[in-house]
Amino acid sequence: MEVGRIAGAWGVQGAIRVHPFAADPQALLGCASWWLRPPEGPAPQPLPPAAAPLPSQLRVRQARMHGDAVVARCEGLSDRDAAQALKGARVFVARSSFPAAAPDEYYWVDLIGAEVVNRQGVVLGTVSGLLETGPQCVLCVAPPPAARDVAGPGPNPPETLIPFVSAYVDSVDTAARVIRVDWEADALS
């Protein structure tokens, strides 16, 4: 799972600074190995001839919070230049490294792609993402393929936004990838 991006070197002895994607980056802090992938987007700048290629994995010797970033010392990074060469790399950890979620708490990654079904058994669609609005999160539900077919050519029907609160969410079964909600199908239009 992608958990952060390398922001660049920290200090002169090869430490790196990582911007975590979570407010509480326990998976990043507690994992002994991080996997790296190049940045997304436009083609990265070519590396200088003497630069080493992006390693696929880093062994973390030490990681700690420093302000809103994680500072880490990793094997094989002995100076500022080696650390700075990793700037922009995406950091991944194994899903098994994530701390167990508390009851009635869920990782977004476990909700995305789940089928959303109302109390009448109507499939409203699948979770395409979540929005954090401050007091609560909101499920972004993409319409099911049948609704897209009925809409005909042109733009797809809009996503439905359902507050992820107990007033609307009856149950979440992450194993079955199904979220049951109290939401009317005609509220989709």
Image (spheres, helix red, strand yellow):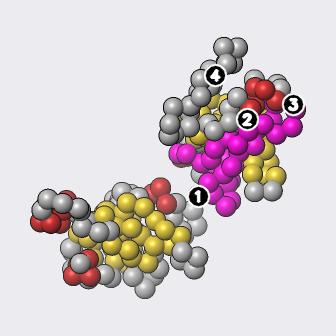
Q: Nearer the viewer, residue 72 or 42?
A: 42
Q: Which mark is residue 185?
A: none
Answer yes or no: is residue 166 visible: yes
Q: Which mark is residue 100?
A: 1
Pointer 2 residue: 60
In the rendered view, would you say 70 is above or below 45? below
Pointer 3 residue: 13
Q: Which residues are magenta?
A: 1-30
Q: Earlier in the sequence, mark 1 or mark 3?
A: 3
Q: CA distance from mark 1 to mark 2?
A: 22 Å
Q: CA distance from mark 2 to mark 3?
A: 14 Å
Answer yes or no: is residue 116 visible: no
Q: CA distance from mark 1 to mark 3?
A: 34 Å
Q: Nearer the viewer, mark 1 or mark 4?
A: 4
Identify residue type, mark 1. Answer: Ala
Q: Is residue 49 magenta?
A: no
Quick check: marks 1 and 3 in contact, CB under 8 Å?
Answer: no
Identify residue type, mark 4. Answer: Leu
Drawn side of residue 138 relative to residue 79, left or right: left
For the point 34% across and 77% down, the residue is: 181
Q: CA distance from mark 3 to mark 4?
A: 21 Å
Q: Crowding at label 3, few (<14), some or many (≥20) Cα neighbours within 10 Å? A: some
Q: CA distance from mark 4 to mark 2?
A: 24 Å
Q: Earlier in the sequence, mark 1 or mark 2?
A: 2
SS class, disc 2: strand
Q: Earlier in the sequence, mark 1 or mark 4?
A: 4
